[in-house]
């Protein structure tokens, strides 16, 4: 019997590594990508397309969550809120998108149940998550319980976050071990041609590559 894994794939480093790990574990992949009017929406979609082609994933969902624009309240959508570029600070940053992973996982659970997938894979990271509350392991555990309660008794879906306890350097090392296509990924919060190198996401990514002792092959402006 074919094992199916639904992977939430943004096109970033973490979700790409988690997806490649699932392939390495012998799962048939269903790739799920969300667009929500984020600043780099087109570039992330391009990264997703390139990654699924590279990994030979044929079962693909691309879902537009335009209603996120109505919610706003995040620098990733609202251009009147500046993307932080001064380095990581304590607390929840302006790039936090309210309950984004909760919404993503609710939709992922519906698709996973329809497709008969036994696993939902999310590249959430707690240690290097920029302080996002919906990347914490206790939040993931609560969503697992909700998925169990909100699906058919015959549906058995495990919410899998293989990177949750790793830091960026460890994720880079894991990705290299399984030949994940890191050169196709995109992590920058604000640029779509060359990565800015100074937003939280770029800083975390660059630090991870530096500690891992390898060069990041995507282009940076700084």
Image: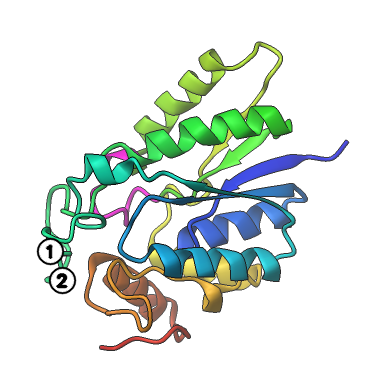
Magenta residues, start to end: 125-134
SS for callout 2: loop
Q: What residue does disc 1 label?
A: 82
Residues at marks 2 and 1 touching, judged by CB atoms closer than 8 Å: yes
- Residue 133 counted in the magenta span: yes
- Up the image or down, 176 lies above or below 97; here it is below
Placement of 18 over or under 71, stated as above or below: below
The residue positioned 43% from the left and 55% from the top of the image is: 166
Task: Kindly give the residue lying farthest to the right in the view shown.
Answer: 1
Q: Residue 85 carries which label?
A: 2
Front-most of residues 80 and 182: 80
Mark 2, other Cα within 10 Å: few <14 / some 14–19 / many ≥20: some
Q: In this view, does 57 lie to the left or right of 207?
A: right
Q: Is the magenta stretch mostly helix, strand or loop?
A: loop
Q: Quadrant of the N terminus?
A: top right
Q: Residue furthest top?
A: 153
Image-based side of 19 in relation to 197, left or right: right
Q: Position of residue 131 (x, y in %)?
A: 23, 49
Of residue 68 and residue 102, the one placed in the foreground of this image is: 68
Q: SS of the residue at dot 1?
A: loop
Of 164 and 1, nearer the camera is: 1
Question: x and y percent of residue 63 in the render?
Answer: 51, 46
| Rendering quarter of residue 192 | bottom left
In the picture, measured across the screen, residue 45 lies left or right of residue 135, that is right
């Amino acid at each position: 019997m074919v094992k199916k894994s639904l992977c939430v794939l943004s096109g970033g480093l973490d979700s790409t590594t988690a997806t490649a790990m699932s392939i390495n574990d012998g799962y048939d992949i269903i790739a799920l990508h969300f667009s929500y009017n984020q600043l780099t929406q087109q570039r992330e979609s391009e990264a997703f397309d390139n990654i699924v082609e590279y990994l030979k994933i044929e079962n693909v969902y691309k879902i537009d969550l335009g209603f996120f624009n109505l919610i706003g309240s995040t620098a990733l959508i609202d251009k009147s809120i500046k993307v932080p570029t001064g380095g990581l600070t304590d607390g929840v940053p302006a790039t936090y998108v309210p309950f984004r992973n909760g919404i993503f996982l609710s939709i992922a659970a519906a698709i996973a149940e329809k497709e008969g997938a036994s696993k939902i894979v999310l590249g959430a990271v707690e240690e290097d998550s920029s302080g996002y509350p919906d990347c914490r392991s206790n939040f993931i555990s609560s969503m697992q319980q909700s998925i169990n309660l909100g699906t058919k008794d015959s549906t058995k879906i495990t919410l899998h976050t293989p990177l949750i306890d790793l830091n960026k350097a460890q994720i880079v090392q894991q990705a290299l071990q399984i030949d994940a296509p890191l050169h196709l990924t995109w992590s920058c919060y604000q640029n779509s041609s060359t990565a800015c190198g100074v937003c939280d996401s770029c800083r975390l990514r660059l630090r991870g590559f530096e500690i891992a002792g390898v060069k990041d092959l995507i282009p940076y402006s700084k």
